[in-house]
Image (cartoon, helix red, strand yellow):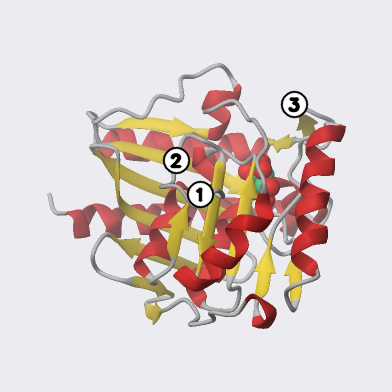
Amino acid sequence: ITTRQIFKNACELVVSSGKYVKSAHIASTKPSSDNKESFADLVTEYDRGTEKLLIGQLSRCYPAHKFIAEEMVADGGECNLTNEPTWIIDPIDGTTNFVHGFPAYCISVGFFVEKDPVLGIVYDIPNDKIYSAIKGEGAFCNGRVIKCSSTTDLNSSLLAAGFGPQRKTDFLRFKMGIMNTLVEKCHGIRCIGSAALDICHVAAGYIDANVQFGPHIWDYAAAHLIALEAGAVCSAPNGQPMNLLSRKLLVCSTDELRDQIVPLLGDFPLPHD
Ligand code: IPD
């Protein structure tokens, strides 16, 4: 079986799982949610249901493949990225938006072999946009090639960042500090509440850089490949090579932008995935 066939199969599966997620809002009441690590860290029956659908179908097609998925890990499953072919899944990235009906949430599916990303699919459900990439073949949105911007000057850039669902004062202060420093130097900072979409927006060229402290590998596994294939530079926020398990990521459209952002960020200790 070729990577292209696996990709096609996964795209179809993601789109059909998206129909299930869409059905939540047809019911016109807000989907009910439970809390995970904090009162602001939400999970719904649709997160669990989508993950079940995706893992169920993918494991039927590819019985030898491994999985790392958000709700599986939340329920005590292992987050262990090995050399085996592995699917990394966030059934709904932007669950808070999904619960409130704010139109920015997506399904994120990445596929890794020998710890390297091979394909990434991010389906922006309310806007019906499928961002995708196969390693070495460029990045696409709904089948059209996308490229990140050529912005080299922080003063001319539009950035994305977020607060995340953690509610620890020192961590939030750290994030506020970054926002304060960055906003003085750029055109604006957008916080849309989905790490995967933030990164896809860099790939699409309308956000110039995105900094992430706190999300997990399933939030950015697929999107970071899409950004790389669109020409973006991915590193750790301190400019070192990125580590996908570190829960820290800086995605910039150009090296010049990265070089201006890195000295402004500082660091915050976070347990690895
Ligand atoms: C969250 C979103 C958010 C990010 C959080 C993630 P979820 O994902 O990506 O933008 O800041 O850290 O947890 O929980 O909605 O899948």
**Could you tell me the amino acid type at mark 3?**
Glu
Residue plotted at (29% across, 54% down): 9
Question: Looking at the picture, does residue 15 appear above or below residue 49?
Answer: below
Rendered location of residue 172, percent (x, y): 82, 41
> Left or right of 173: which side holds 118?
left
Element at label 3: loop
Query: Could you tell me how far apart the alpha carbons at marks 3 and 2 are, in whole angstroms?
Result: 21 Å
Residue lying at the far top of the rendered structure? 76
Residue plotted at (46% across, 20% down): 78
Which image quadrant is residue 178 in? bottom right
Q: Front-most of 199 and 7?
A: 199
| Mark toward the viewer: 1 or 2 | 2
Question: Which residue, given by chain and number where applicable, does mark 1 sit on?
Answer: 220
Query: Could you tell me how far apart the alpha carbons at marks 1 and 2 are, in whole angstroms?
Result: 8 Å
Q: Label 1: few (<14), some or many (≥20) within 10 Å?
A: many
Residue plotted at (59% across, 25% down): 271
Question: Which residue, given by chain and number where applicable, does mark 2 sit on?
Answer: 244
Q: Is the residue at mark 1 in contact range of ligand 1, meaning its CB lies under 8 Å from it?
A: no
Look at the numbered discs 3 and 2 and tell me whether their residues touch, using CB distance below 8 Å. no
**Could you tell me the amino acid type at mark 1?**
Tyr
Residue plotted at (56% across, 38% down): 247
Does the image show residue 25? yes
Between discs 3 and 2, the one toward the N terminus = 3
Question: Looking at the picture, does residue 208 appear above or below residue 116?
Answer: below
Query: Could you tell me how far apart the alpha carbons at marks 3 and 1 are, in whole angstroms?
Result: 19 Å
Between discs 3 and 1, the one toward the N terminus = 3
**Could you tell me the amino acid type at mark 2?**
Leu
Question: Which residue, given by chain and number where applicable, does mark 3 sit on?
Answer: 37
